[in-house]
Amino acid sequence: MRKNRFLFFVALGVFTIILVSVHGALASEPAQIPTVAIPTVTGTAPGPIATVRRDTDQDQINVRSGPSVKYDIIGVLVPGQQVPALGRTPGGDWVQITYLGVQGSVGWVYSPLVEVSGNVPIVEPPPTPTPGTTPTIDPTLAAQFVVEIPPTRLPTYTPPPPLVIPTFTLEESQIQTANFPMGFVVIGLFVVGFFGIIISVLRGQ
């Protein structure tokens, strides 16, 4: 039993000496200097960025497949959101942006709704979308809803009977009276009244 313990302690001491010697050899070796060029990572300047304006009255802005309201809406952006700007229309009214998740990963936004930092090139807009099938009206179905209003009969005009103006003939006595001047009658009445007043005054005295 004592012999086994002695052999155990001897083996442990030999193992410890080996570890110490190996560690000292590794520590004494100089660090290896690489002989190849180490690539350095340099940051590239970010491209133009389009930021959705926060002072708009809209909760979100539309992203369209082309630079016009005639194109379909393919997504939306919220105020403050930033996306890479790829280009702009010749007039500068629309900005082309990177919009992942759609065909080509490209969309268009209305330029007054975003702020673009950096210079963006002028790009050729996509072709105008072909309008869909124009709906036609079935004439047979439409005829069922057409209401015919009969023409209103205008009242007939009956001319009035001719106007008869009565004529009166003056008799001979009326003609003579009519020819007598009325001025003389007035003067005569005035004279008679004047004399009547004088007589009344004289009687009163």
Image (spheres, rainbow, N blue to C red):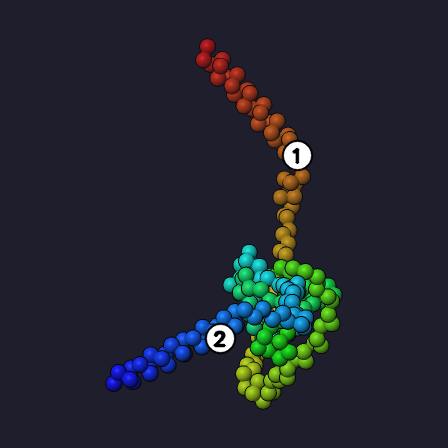
Residue 59, horizontal then vertical, whole percent: 51, 63
Q: CA distance from mark 2 to mark 1?
A: 172 Å
Q: Amino acid at mark 2?
A: Val
Rendered view: 152 above or below 164: below
Q: Residue at x 67, y 68 (%)?
A: 86
Q: Residue at x 51, y 17 (%)?
A: 199
- Label 2: how many Cα within 10 Å (few below 14, some 14–19, many 20+): few
Q: Residue at x 65, y 43 (%)?
A: 175
Q: Residue furthest left?
A: 1
Residue 34, horizontal then vertical, whole percent: 64, 71
Is 13 left, or right, of 81 in this rendering? left
Location of the N terminus by quadrant is: bottom left
Which one is closest to the eye, mark 2 or mark 1?
Answer: 2
Displayed quadrant of residue 7: bottom left
The residue nearer to you, when weighing 5 against 31, is 5
Whether label 2 touches label 1, CB < 8 Å: no
Q: Secondary structure at mark 1?
A: loop
Mark nearer the N terminus (2 vs 1): 2
Q: Residue furthest top?
A: 205
Is 109 left, or right, of 20 in this rendering? right
Displayed quadrant of residue 35: bottom right
The residue nearer to you, when weighing 204 against 77, is 77
Rendered view: 62 above or below 205: below
Residue where numbered disc 1 is placed:
181
Displayed quadrant of residue 15: bottom left
Q: Secondary structure at mark 2?
A: helix
Is 51 left, or right, of 17 in this rendering? right
Residue where numbered disc 2 is placed:
22
- Label 1: how many Cα within 10 Å (few below 14, some 14–19, many 20+): few
Q: Amino acid at mark 1?
A: Pro
Residue 67, horizontal then vertical, whole percent: 67, 70
